[in-house]
């Protein structure tokens, strides 16, 4: 009759090795990722990017060659803003006139105007 007197005891399996636990952990990680994406990427905006562009266009006094719009959270409380950049292009391809108009995405008010003229 064989004996197990000389053999080491079988190590306990880690609960994370069980398929059900792995599936539960994966679902948990996915739920956290979805929640984080929804809360971090939420835009509490009343003003669309097109509306912000039209509002900002009224604040400039030149006809731009290029227009670029970016959504930016600004300030300690991360208030939503649209940064609308207007620029003209020189003959050599460099930017001649760059104006950035920052529009509050909730109210439509212009918060800031920055102008760089070459």
Image (cartoon, rainbow, N blue to C red):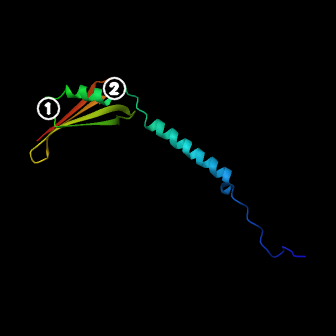
Q: Is residue 91 above or below residue 12?
A: above
Which quadrant would residue 83 be assigned to in this image?
Answer: top left
Question: Residue 5, position in %: x, y?
Answer: 84, 74
Give me the residue at 38% from left, 34% from top: 78
Task: Give the side of residue 45 with respect to residue 97, left or right.
Answer: right
Residue 21: horizontal and vertical position, in percent? 66, 50
* 85 vs 63, nearest the viewer: 63
Horizontal relation, residue 64 to residue 49: left or right: left
Which label's residue is closer to the chain start, 1 or 2? Answer: 2
Residue 56 quadrant: top left
Q: Could you tell me which residue is drawn at 29 percent across and 29 percent down?
A: 50
Numbered disc 1: secondary structure: loop
Q: Horizontal and vertical percent for residue 32?
A: 54, 42
Looking at the rendered structure, the number of numbered marks drawn on it comes to 2
- The answer to whether mark 1 and mark 2 are in CB contact below 8 A is no
User: As drawn, is 87 to the left or to the right of 11?
Assistant: left
* Circle 1 Cα neighbour tier, 10 Å, few/some/many (<14 / 14–19 / ≥20): few
The picture places residue 84, in percent across and down from the top left corner, at 25, 34
In the image, which disc is placed on residue 76?
A: none
Q: Is residue 73 above or below residue 28?
A: above
Which quarter of the rendered picture does the C terminus lie within?
top left
Residue at image point 56% right, 41% down: 31
Residue 28 falls in which quadrant of the image?
top right
Q: Is residue 87 left or right of residue 36?
A: left
Where disc 2 sits, the SS reads loop
Q: Which residue is mark 2?
A: 47
Q: CA distance from mark 1 to mark 2?
A: 23 Å
Q: Report the disc number at residue 63.
A: 1
Given residues 117 and 2, the one toward you in this image is: 2
Count neighbours of disc 2 (C-alpha within 10 A) and say few if under 14, some if 14 to 19, many if 20 or more: many
Residue located farthest toward the right when viewing the structure as drawn: 1
């Amino acid at each position: 009759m064989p004996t197990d007197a000389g053999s080491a005891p079988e190590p306990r399996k880690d609960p994370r090795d069980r398929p059900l636990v792995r599936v539960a952990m994966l679902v948990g990680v996915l739920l956290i990722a979805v929640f984080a994406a929804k809360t971090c990427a939420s835009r509490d905006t009343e003003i669309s990017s097109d509306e912000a562009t039209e509002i900002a266009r009224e604040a400039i006094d030149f006809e731009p060659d290029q227009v670029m719009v970016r959504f930016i959270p600004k300030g300690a409380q991360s208030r939503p803003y649209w940064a609308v950049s207007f620029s003209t292009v020189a003959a050599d391809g460099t930017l001649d006139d760059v104006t950035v108009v920052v529009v509050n995405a909730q109210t439509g008010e212009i918060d800031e105007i920055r102008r760089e003229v070459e």
